[in-house]
């Protein structure tokens, strides 16, 4: 039997996982990657440890982590979800481990383990991996496709389009007839110039609350002061859910920050209880809340309270000022910084044009689309990869079921 030719355009998570699950008896597969290295995002994910997926095993709950694509992914996750991802890697002797925040990493703590496994799977099937192959055009020719690259042309019976969200790759598939939702950054940190945050990068808060009054939205979770402003899951969740609205605001807006994650009344009770129990302490040495001494001193300075003042002599007005700065701090955001190198965008191929039973294009015959080129994205925590694994698995199952 003559094997059918599949060209996978894009050597990232979705492209490789699809290839790794294809039947080598039926298909001759070539992966075209424009860079000199494959699986680049896998390599840098999770600080080089690779946040493979997330310990959320209920498809409905899982879909809730995707600001764009949650409805469409529900059926996809019913067929392949994080439990299946764990099984897939464990069957290939790559044990994964669940961390306290439910993120899942390889036990080796190295993204190279994941890369090696995927590359080995694909190489063992004798599929071809061609790096530095830039696709310049895709032309439909009768029942096949001609893929034009900087290193020659290829013909394909089936095309799997897993290019990521680079503008050029969106343009290519748009030229073939797909509608593109303009991409905007999805995961980013907030640039804030505020004297409360100056010189305190690395200071973290276990459960902060952040709201954008203008957009009537709020999120909570760990938060971090950076050189540029604020980051951490609480910020990244808001940036993902409100990616389009924040782009419309040109990243100029006001946020309300509660560093303690408790309401001002509870904070006041905590303060007064501490004061009653420690009447002789100075305010500067008082560990009233679970924050660093440096941050506490900065709050007192901003609130114009003398560090050496006895806690029992703090006036009601001074207490209110301290609590307002801790629990209801208004800050002006003046821009964004992309979250590390894990660049994720909202936008891409219009989801109405994809059949989510098998990730095939409704516009182009024998073309499948998966990964970040779709208008799907998630909050941080391994969810973006899980969408890639699940979508790619569906494509492979569909192709494998074709009677040749």
Image: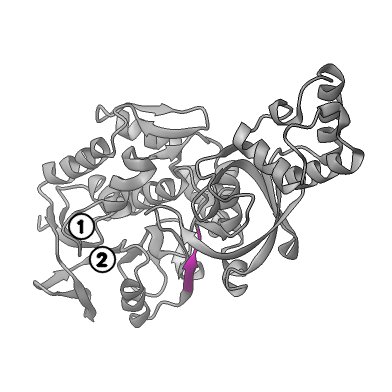
Q: Quick one: quadrant of the N terminus?
A: bottom left
Query: What's the residue at 31%, 50% (across, down)?
Result: 13
Residue furthest to the right? 316
Q: Residue 141's image quarter?
A: bottom left
Question: What stretch of residues is rendered in magenta?
Answer: 182-186
Q: The residue tagged with tag 1: helix, strand or loop?
A: loop
Q: The residue tagged with tag 2: helix, strand or loop?
A: strand
Q: From the viewer's perspective, is 135 left or right of 59?
A: left
Marks 1 and 2, Cα distance to the nearest angstrom?
A: 16 Å
One can see residue 207 in this view? no
Q: Which residue is mark 1?
A: 404
The x and y percentages for residue 247 are 56, 70
State the count of labels. 2
Q: Residue 402's image quarter?
A: bottom left
Q: Quick one: quadrant of the C terminus?
A: bottom left
Query: What's the residue at 81%, 34% (across, down)?
Result: 267
Q: Which residue is mark 2?
A: 159
**Mark 1 or mark 2, which is nearer to you?**
2
One can see residue 193 in this view? yes
The x and y percentages for residue 349 are 43, 70
The x and y percentages for residue 133 are 15, 66
Q: Nearer the viewer, residue 8 or 181?
A: 181
Q: Nearer the viewer, residue 88 or 226?
A: 226
Are there few (<14), some (14-19), or many (20+) residues within 10 Å of tag 2? many
């Amino acid at each position: 039997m003559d094997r059918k030719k599949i060209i996978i355009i894009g050597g990232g998570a979705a492209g490789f996982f699809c290839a790794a699950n294809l039947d080598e008896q039926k298909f001759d597969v070539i992966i075209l990657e424009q860079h000199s290295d494959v699986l680049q995002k896998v390599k840098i994910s999770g600080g080089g440890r690779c946040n493979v997926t997330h310990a959320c095993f209920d498809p409905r709950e899982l879909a809730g982590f995707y600001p764009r694509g949650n409805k469409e992914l529900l059926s996809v996750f019913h067929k392949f979800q994080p439990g299946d991802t764990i099984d897939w890697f464990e069957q290939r002797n790559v044990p994964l481990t669940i961390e306290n925040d439910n993120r899942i990493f390889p036990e080796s703590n190295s993204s190279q383990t994941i890369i090696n496994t995927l590359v080995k799977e694909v190489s063992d099937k004798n599929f071809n991996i061609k790096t530095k192959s830039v696709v310049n055009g895709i032309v439909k020719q009768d029942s096949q496709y001609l893929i034009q690259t900087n290193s020659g042309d290829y013909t394909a019976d089936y095309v799997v389009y897993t290019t990521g969200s680079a503008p050029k790759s969106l343009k290519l598939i748009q030229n073939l007839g797909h509608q593109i939702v303009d991409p905007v950054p999805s995961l980013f940190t907030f640039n804030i110039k505020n004297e409360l945050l100056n010189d305190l990068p690395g200071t973290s808060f276990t459960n902060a609350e952040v709201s954008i009054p203008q957009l009537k939205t709020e999120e909570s979770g760990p938060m971090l002061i950076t050189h540029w402003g604020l980051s951490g899951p609480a910020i990244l969740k808001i940036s993902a859910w409100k990616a389009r609205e924040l782009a419309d605001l040109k990243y100029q807006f006001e946020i309300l920050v509660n560093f303690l994650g408790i309401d001002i009344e509870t904070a006041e009770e905590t303060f007064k209880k501490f004061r009653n129990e420690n009447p002789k302490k100075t305010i500067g040495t008082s560990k009233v809340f679970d924050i660093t001494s440096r941050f506490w001193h900065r709050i007192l300075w901003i609130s114009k309270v003398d560090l050496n003042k006895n806690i029992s002599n703090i006036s009601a007005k001074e207490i209110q000022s301290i609590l307002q700065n801790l629990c209801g701090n208004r800050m002006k955001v003046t821009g964004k910084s992309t979250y590390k190198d894990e660049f994720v965008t909202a936008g891409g191929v219009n989801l109405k044009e994809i059949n989510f039973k098998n990730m095939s294009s409704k516009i182009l015959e024998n073309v499948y689309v998966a990964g970040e080129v779709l208008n799907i994205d998630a909050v941080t925590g391994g969810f973006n990869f899980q969408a890639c694994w699940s979508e790619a698995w569906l494509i492979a199952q569909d192709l494998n079921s074709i009677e040749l």
